């Protein structure tokens, strides 16, 4: 068992570790940093989506001797950003594949001179025909990537799908689409790079994964590991948007630093960040489902496609998670998921909170309501009849060995939201009101940690050390960007070592100091890395008992006295442990079968919406989220994760639209890319059911991504309940409602409102 | 070039400052670059996100939209001026306790907007808090715990005012 029963620190609302620095305004983000002799860097980007670069000319009115200019030919190592594949160049070399692709880099001591310099570079292109949509890409008339535009595909099969359809009482089909979404972290991407001949390269930056950047810089500069050092600065939001992109901007600043001989800072402004960095993958998901007379799922056939953008980046792993979340939290004997990610000539889509699951969840959870309407069943009842339970198998034939309490979560969500009574009342009131209200629900899971054998490949190393008297440090590459890494990992260490919260600090997030505990992604930090810290602490106690005479029961002072005895006798005191998969975790990458995730977090979301039939605005009036994510390590931080994820997902559903014109983002400003404000976010009610997970840090499972999966379908289901119209695309903006209602003869204001379900 | 720049005098957090800078330099950049008060952040540079919010003569402004010349003779308050004698301001304490800050990048601006709100309306309703903070974007919290923080700070201010009344 991993968890102690005395929770002094775990589960308590201790102050956020770096909170005081943030509140005083003294936390140091990258743009707050200065270096002696600092220069600034800027990027010359492509203005066309696809084509050959024919010439590059420099405006003669500018004295280019003042500037350092870097092109692909200046790259000492490999001209690619090292990720899963190596198809994305660091700087375009002769050809561009999307708008805003980096071609040249320019540095100067005065940042105000850079704008003019960037404008002073004229690039002549020979355009090639671009591809902008999934449909254009899958037609393969124009091939823009590899031999066939196909970045990745998966086939997941269980049972006999055809026989399931043969036995069906109902067959229900639907197609669902989701748009791109921008992370909109309030701190844009930024780094400082410094090059010294003797020590190599040092990069400070706003980033999630120091060792991703480290690996990428090693390839771009052809340097040994110990000549590259990456240090995370305080990071002002990330949400996946600083998972892979920092490798790009870090390489750029580093190339300028090496050539100019000065430290170089590149901090994007908002327009550049929006235009040039990654977004959430757009998707199209087609469902065809066989259902029996009682509403039981007999077979699911799912065709899932994502738009991956111009290079492969993380599209294969996003697609994998989308595939594994596509069938939803339901028991179905026969499932086929065919998924494909297609290349287009847009900025590569990348990691974003949920990582494919929000797209998959939108489709299945909208589709469940469509099935319910078609077969004349209450959508709540339809879900309940098909929920996974303990002992059931998922689409990958993973047996649910841990408790699955969807029924309990659903009951609580219905009670807390007064779902059924409200739905009845709204149906009555809507008949004579311009405001149409409705209630909608979504049920879902989110797999914690890397998919399949991913955690084994990562082979994470983490631990604790005692570098000075009275100070235990947590040694991880897991970073803080608002979600609470610093706080929960020090809580776990303090709890396990039986020390005070203030006795434990975080080692600096510096690849020169910390071991590689893997990237800070995939809702893995509390569960996977937290468990490593817990094991490392238990190992430290054993070590001190064995070598330094620590008693079984000890006080804080006795613990640190033992540490000092150990250090005096043996020098350094540290305890590091490597990842060990929980028992019974087997994954077959070829057949896509087995334990897709070591654990799942589960949730029910309920949305109450109001659609104004005169202004065509759809507003979320109230929201309820009931979830089971293992032990809750910190109630305030966990609640904040859920609320923040829901707000971001309300934006995904109703506000946030990336508009591309010829492959360039046309609304690359906060003025016209609209996220929810303080006036838009409804009251959000958050409830946790806690079942400690034996193999998670002090019982935790992942929580960070889960809340982004459910709101969009819950909201659109509520809109269907309110208006009788089944919308199948997000974002759903007022103009989309206008197009549906105002331009239709039987607009809801002028016709009796249908009830979509028996109540 | 810099010889032609005007010298601009103003108060920042009660301290008088004289800065020689281009007249149209953004107050945000003067605070961050000339005075090294980097608590004030830039999020969008166009007055949408509120991360650069400071108070100027008692008004809440986006310092990215204020040319420094306009600050001549002004009283500026930034996040660095909130804590007094090493003690957190009630709003800072409430943000810490209630989870009002996550990544922290919007926090200085949010604190200034909340300070401004409470200065004008010591006991705002939830609707007034929503409206008062609508110009400040936070992408982490969904605002819920920011509202909680402002309510808690208003309550604690009230409690202290009560105590002061009793003490008299």
Image: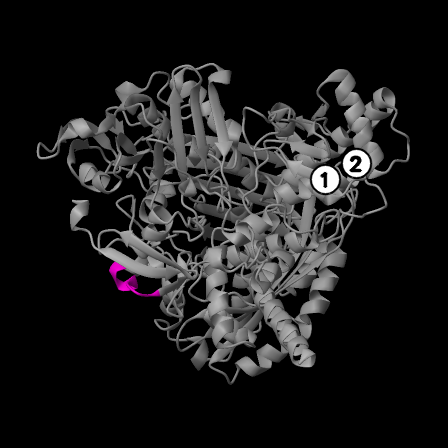
Q: Quadrant of the C terminus of chain A?
A: bottom right
What segment is highlighted magenta in the picture?
Answer: B67-74
Q: Is residue A637 magenta?
A: no
- Give the class, few, some or many, for how many residues have Cα within 10 Å of label 1's Cα (few <14, many ≥20): some
Colour convention = one colour
Above or below, A358 against A588 in this view is below
- Give the class, few, some or many, for how many residues have Cα within 10 Å of label 2's Cα (few <14, many ≥20): many
Above or below, B143 against A277 in this view is below
Q: Chain of mark 2?
A: A
- Percent x, y for residue A531? 72, 35
Q: Can you identify the residue that label 2 sits on?
A: A497
Element on which disc 1 rests:
helix
Q: Quadrant of residue A580?
A: top right
Element on which disc 2 rests:
helix
Q: Are marks 1 and 2 in contact (CB under 8 Å)?
A: yes
Q: Can you identify the residue that label 1 sits on?
A: A503
């Amino acid at each position: 068992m991993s968890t102690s029963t005395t929770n002094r620190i775990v589960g308590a609302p201790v102050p956020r570790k770096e909170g005081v620095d943030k509140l005083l305004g003294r936390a140091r983000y990258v743009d707050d940093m200065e270096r002696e002799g600092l220069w600034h860097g800027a990027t010359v980007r492509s203005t066309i989506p696809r084509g050959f670069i024919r010439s590059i000319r420099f405006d003669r009115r500018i004295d280019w001797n003042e500037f350092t200019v870097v092109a692909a030919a200046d790259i000492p190592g490999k001209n690619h950003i090292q990720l899963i594949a190596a198809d994305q160049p660091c700087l375009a070399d002769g050809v561009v594949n999307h708008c805003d692709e980096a071609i040249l880099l320019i540095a100067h001591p005065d940042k105000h001179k850079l704008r003019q310099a960037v404008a002073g570079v004229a690039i002549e292109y020979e355009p090639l025909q671009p591809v902008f949509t999934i449909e254009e890409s899958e037609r393969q008339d124009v091939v823009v990537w590899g031999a066939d535009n196909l970045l990745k595909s998966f086939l997941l099969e269980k049972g006999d799908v055809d026989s399931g359809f043969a036995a069906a009482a109902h067959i229900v089909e639907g197609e669902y689409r989701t748009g791109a979404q921008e992370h909109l972290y309030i701190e844009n991407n930024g780094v400082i790079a410094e090059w010294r001949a003797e020590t190599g390269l040092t990069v400070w930056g706003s980033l999630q994964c120091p060792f991703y950047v480290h690996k990428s810089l090693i390839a771009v500069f052809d340097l040994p590991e110990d000549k590259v050092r990456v240090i995370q600065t305080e990071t002002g939001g990330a949400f996946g948007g600083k998972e892979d992109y920092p490798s790009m901007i870090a390489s750029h600043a580093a190339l300028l630093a090496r050539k100019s001989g000065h430290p170089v800072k590149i901090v994007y402004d908002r327009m550049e960040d929006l235009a040039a960095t990654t977004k959430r993958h757009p998707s199209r998901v087609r469902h065809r489902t066989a259902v029996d007379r009682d509403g039981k799922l007999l077979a699911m056939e799912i065709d899932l496609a994502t738009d991956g953008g111009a290079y492969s980046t993380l599209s294969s792993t996003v697609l994998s998670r989308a595939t594994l979340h596509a069938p939803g939290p339901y028991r179905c004997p026969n499932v086929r998921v065919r998924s494909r990610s297609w290349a287009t000539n847009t900025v590569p889509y990348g990691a974003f909170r949920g990582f494919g699951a929000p797209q998959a969840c939108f489709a299945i959870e909208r589709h469940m309501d469509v099935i319910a309407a078609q077969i004349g069943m209450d959508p709540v009842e339809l879900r309940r009849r098909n929920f996974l339970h303990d002992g059931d198998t998922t689409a990958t034939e993973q047996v649910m060995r841990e408790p699955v309490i969807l029924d309990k979560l659903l009951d609580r969500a219905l009670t807390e939201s007064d779902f059924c009574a409200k739905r009845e009342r709204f149906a009555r009131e809507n008949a004579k009101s311009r405001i149409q209200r409705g209630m909608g629900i979504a049920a879902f899971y989110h797999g914690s940690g890397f998919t399949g054998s991913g955690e084994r490949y990562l082979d994470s190393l983490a631990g604790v050390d005692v570098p000075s008297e009275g100070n235990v440090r947590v040694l991880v590459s897991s970073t803080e960007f608002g979600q609470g890494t610093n706080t929960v990992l020090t809580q776990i260490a303090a709890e396990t070592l039986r020390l005070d919260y203030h006795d434990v600090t975080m080692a600096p997030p510096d690849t020169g100091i910390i071991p590689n505990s893997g990237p800070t992604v995939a809702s893995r930090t509390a569960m996977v890395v937290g468990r490593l810290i817990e094991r490392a602490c238990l190992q430290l106690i054993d070590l001190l008992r064995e070598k330094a005479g620590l008693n079984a029961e000890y006080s804080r002072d006795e613990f640190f006295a033992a540490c000092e005895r150990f250090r005096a006798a043996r020098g350094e005191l540290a305890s590091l442990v490597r990842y060990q998969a929980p028992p019974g975790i087997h994954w077959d990458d070829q057949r896509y079968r087995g334990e897709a995730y070591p654990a799942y977090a589960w949730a029910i979301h309920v949305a109450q919406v109001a659609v104004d039939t005169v202004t065509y605005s759809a507003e979320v009036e109230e929201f309820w989220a009931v979830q089971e994510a293992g032990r809750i390590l910190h109630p305030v931080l966990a609640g904040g994760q859920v609320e923040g994820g829901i707000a971001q997902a309300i934006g995904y559903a109703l506000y946030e639209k990336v508009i591309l014109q010829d492959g360039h983002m046309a609304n690359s400003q906060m003025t016209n890319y609209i996220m929810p404000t303080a006036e838009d976010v409804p009251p959000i009610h958050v409830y946790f059911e806690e079942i400690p997970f034996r193999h998670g840090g002090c019982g935790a499972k992942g929580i960070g991504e889960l809340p982004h999966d459910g709101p969009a379908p819950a909201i659109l289901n509520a809109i269907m309940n309110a208006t009788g119209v089944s919308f199948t695309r997000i974002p759903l903006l007022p103009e989309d409602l206008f197009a549906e209602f105002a331009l239709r003869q039987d607009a809801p204001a002028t016709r009796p409102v249908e009830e979509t379900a028996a109540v | 070039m810099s010889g032609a720049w005007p010298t601009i005098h103003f108060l920042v957090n009660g301290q008088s400052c004289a800065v020689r800078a281009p007249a149209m330099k953004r107050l945000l950049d003067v605070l961050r670059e000339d005075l090294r008060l980097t608590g004030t952040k830039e999020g969008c540079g166009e007055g949408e996100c509120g991360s650069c919010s400071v108070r100027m003569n008692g008004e809440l402004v986006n310092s990215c939209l204020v040319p420094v010349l306009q600050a001549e003779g002004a009283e500026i308050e930034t996040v660095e001026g909130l804590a007094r004698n090493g003690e957190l301001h009630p709003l800072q304490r409430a943000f810490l306790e209630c989870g009002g800050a996550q990544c922290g990048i919007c926090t200085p601006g949010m604190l200034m907007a909340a300070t401004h709100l409470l200065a004008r309306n010591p006991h705002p309703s939830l609707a007034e808090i929503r409206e008062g903070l609508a110009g400040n974007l936070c992408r982490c919290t969904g605002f819920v715990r920011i509202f909680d923080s402002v309510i808690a700070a208003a309550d604690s201010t009230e409690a202290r005012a009560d105590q002061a009344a009793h003490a008299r």
